[in-house]
Amino acid sequence: MDFQEAARRVETLREQIKEYSRLYYEEDSPAVEDDEFDALTRELRRLEEEYPQLVTPDSYTQRVQGAASALFAPVQHVVPLESLQDVFSFEELREFDRRVRETVEDPVYVVEPKIDGLSIALEYVDGRFVQGATRGDGQVGEDVSHNLRTIRTIPEKLTRPVPRIIVRGEVYMPRESFAALVERQELAGEKPFKNPRNAAAGSLRQKDAAVTKGRNLDIFVFNLQLLEGEEVSSHAESLEYMKELGFHIIPFYSVVASVEEVIREVERIGEKRRSLSFDIDGAVVKVNSFSQRARLGSTAKFPKWASAYKYPPEEKQTTLLGVEINVGRTGVLTPTGIFEPVTLAGTTVSRATLHNEDFILEKGLAIGDTVALRKAGDIIPEVVRVVSHLPGAEPYQMPHVCPSCGSEAVREEEEAALRCNNPECPAQRIRNLIHFASRDAMDIEGLGPAVVEQLAAAELVRNAYDLYSLKKEDIAALERMGEKSAENLLAAIEKSKSADLFRVIFALGIRHVGQKAAKLLANRFGSMEAVMNATAEQISDIDGFGGVMAESVVQFFALPQSRHFVEQLRLAGVNMERQGAQPGGEDASADARFAGMTFVLTGTLPTLKRDEAAAIIERFGGKTSGSVSKKTSVVLAGEEAGSKLTKAQQLGIRVINEEEFRAMLK
């Protein structure tokens, strides 16, 4: 590779790494696995070493990644929270040891697990917790003190009043808690977190501390950043010192005197990682002596006295035997691959998600293929690549019929998923029932997720309208119910019959239609019958509605199953009329910040799909259009924006990117 080719490749790598870093550190939504990201950074580092003139101050290799979010107050770190230099082989560990010994004599090392979570700094003054912040870019983090106080293992008061101390730790989510959270998210129709690390980061960055508290986060403290009033001279001593003060320190560590002992300890930690109740993605090797650390110093990004060994992901080859289509609680058809069983990361794997139609076509997956499997984050099995096809193999074709109810499965524009929109689909009944009974919908007190699951398991309800024919004796026979509970539940169900029309509309679970949009529909049309028969044009005329939402309403009521569902509710006695118009024909409490504005979306946005952005605009009272004109208020442009962007610039129309759009939502 000559200099010009290297320069082009370096630029491409930096752009990829920058975007992947933003998604990982700021959005808590990784786009690639750690080993893929590491491979990119290693390639960048190799090219910069080969061509030093290509090194720039803003390169990933020269600075700590991450940034403080505008959602929280910024915190300037008194002592920078540095990254660690990653290594991927024992030879690289030996090279690290050689570099250390060039500066200091007879170093002693501490080897400890590298916890996979969110790095934070905790500050105490006179023994009391005063502030906690995320790492951010290492210099400036986010003040998340309020949320950190919900973690029971973070002491509010130390065992003695040390004048001032700052410690560094890793907030993590135990594997068991992560599994329970994903189950709840799937049940509620939410997009689940990909792994415990991102679940921990997303949970800690909540504006509502009550949400954080319910996520069962924990912490391991692993580094002494600053200490005033007392002294310690080594890392091992500091760990025991922090433990005495009441901190929850890393669960185990070893002090060793040679690099070969370091390697044996790294191997030992690797062997036990599968049995741990929390995720680790490597082992950290640190020089023990603080005075030796001072002599070794740091680069612009890494301390020279520490290194992080990253465990390689385990891959196994197996055969794709078949594909099973599952219908999720939001109606999405998800293909699951059935494989010849293989042992992977300590467990037997015979199934793995194939995500969606695009994933299958991109990989060219066909029945009989030999594929490479691994576990994402050591938890979720996934297909990495196709190793070989059988002769004449054709990619698997996703069915366009729901396997649960036989209804047509549709793929909406710019969506990767096929979706069943039948409100009576058996596969979606639990989620639909929970939504129907929720506080913002029919507000049926006492009918939470646990009771819904009991009723469904006992086959007392199949659809929401079955709730209105429940009998007291059937409910009372359920575990932990009894006659009094049955009477209370029946009374709440009876009360819901008189719910206002907007609640009934929202309870139907129409895609893109939230409670505020349901109020707009109820106020505009006055009855369920009128809403069901409204055209997309009539709905789009509502100030606060737009094309995406209007089409969603029309498509929903075009289904015979939807009309049958509504009719059964009417026969059960559920109210189908508006009970009182809001002033001006729309809900006065609605947030209509985009009222009177028309947006045009063009290009590929960094994180939002265009239909998601359109739904947000319409939810806040704006309208979306497919073409730019003098009536256009704003053009929201992403990458590869074409003629619409050019026309907007010619007409002098305001053009914004996703970051500016998100700022408008704050």
Image: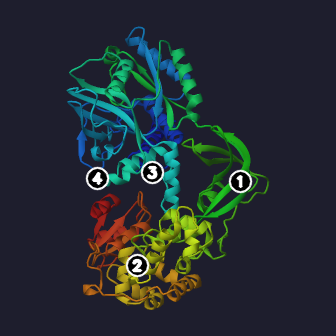
Sequence-wise first label, 2 or 4: 4
Image coordinates of residue 345 in percent, x first then y, are 62, 38
Establish if 520 lies above or below 115: below
Label 4: element kind: loop
**Distance from label 3 to label 2 (Cα)?**
33 Å
Establish if 235 lies above or below 76: above
Count neighbours of disc 3 (C-alpha within 10 A) and say few if under 14, some if 14 to 19, many if 20 or more. Answer: many
Give the label, 3 or 2, closer to the camera.
2
**Distance from label 1 to label 4 (Cα)?**
43 Å
Residue 29's tag is: 3
Residue ID for mark 4: 71
Label 1 is placed on what type of residue? Answer: Ile
Query: Do the residues bearing badges 3 and 2 touch, measured as CB atoms within 8 Å?
Result: no
**Distance from label 4 to label 3 (Cα)?**
17 Å
How are the residues colored? rainbow
Count neighbours of disc 2 (C-alpha within 10 A) and say few if under 14, some if 14 to 19, many if 20 or more. Answer: many
Residue ID for mark 2: 503
Residue ID for mark 1: 338
Sequence-wise first label, 1 or 3: 3
